[in-house]
Amino acid sequence: MPFGPFAKKFSPKKPGPRKAVSLSTLQNLDRETLQRELTPDDIGQKIKINLDGNRMYFDGKDWVSESGNSGVSQKELNSIKRSNEKLKEENNLLKFKLDILLDMLTKSTAEQHLQQKMIDDLKVMVRSKTPSKSRT
């Protein structure tokens, strides 16, 4: 078997086209069942759901509570949720700013303590080098 630039390259045969397989079971249904399944028998009726005792219906663009015990419409609820998200973002920003300010305060306090220590050390050094006047 030759190797190198004169070797025969590996080239597998191209497979033929695949047959499309339908995953739909509609083709197995008879005409009456198909019509019964696909024909909307509730044309003109509202889409209704019941979630944990809260009955709602879809009015075309919003879900509206049917029971009326929620006290807040869906539009108001969405507005409150958006406002809540904005307030959470603002709160996170303020927490971040507070952390930065605390870091700055810590740094300046540490620098002030170092400067005060240097001043105290210099005072001690000056006092030790100057002769006292009480000897004369």
Image (tube, rainbow, N blue to C red):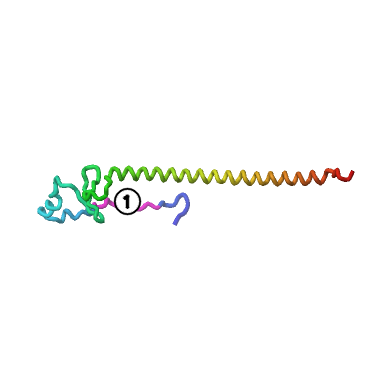
Q: Amino acid at mark 1?
A: Lys
Residue 27 image offset from top left, x and y in percent? 16, 54
Q: Residue furthest left?
A: 32
Instruction: Report the magenta residues as a range.
Output: 10-20
Quarter of the picture containing the N terminus is: bottom left
Taking the spot 72% from the left edge, 45% from the top edge, the residue there is 118
Question: Residue 23 appears in which quarter of the rendering?
Answer: bottom left
**Is 83 or 72 nearer to us in this picture?**
72
Element on which disc 1 rests:
loop
Majority secondary structure in the magenta region: loop
Badge 1: few (under 14), some or many (20 or more) residues near its Cα, within 10 Å?
few
Taking the magenta stretch, the answer to whether it contains residue 17 is yes
Residue 73 image offset from top left, x and y in percent? 27, 45
Figure label count: 1
Q: What residue is pinned by disc 1?
A: 14
Quarter of the picture containing the C terminus is: top right
Question: Residue 29 appears in which quarter of the rendering?
Answer: bottom left
**Is 46 or 126 nearer to us in this picture?**
126
Residue 2 image offset from top left, x and y in percent? 45, 55
Relative horizontal placement of residue 65, taking residue 35 as reference (left or right): right
Relative horizontal placement of residue 4, taking residue 53 as reference (left or right): right
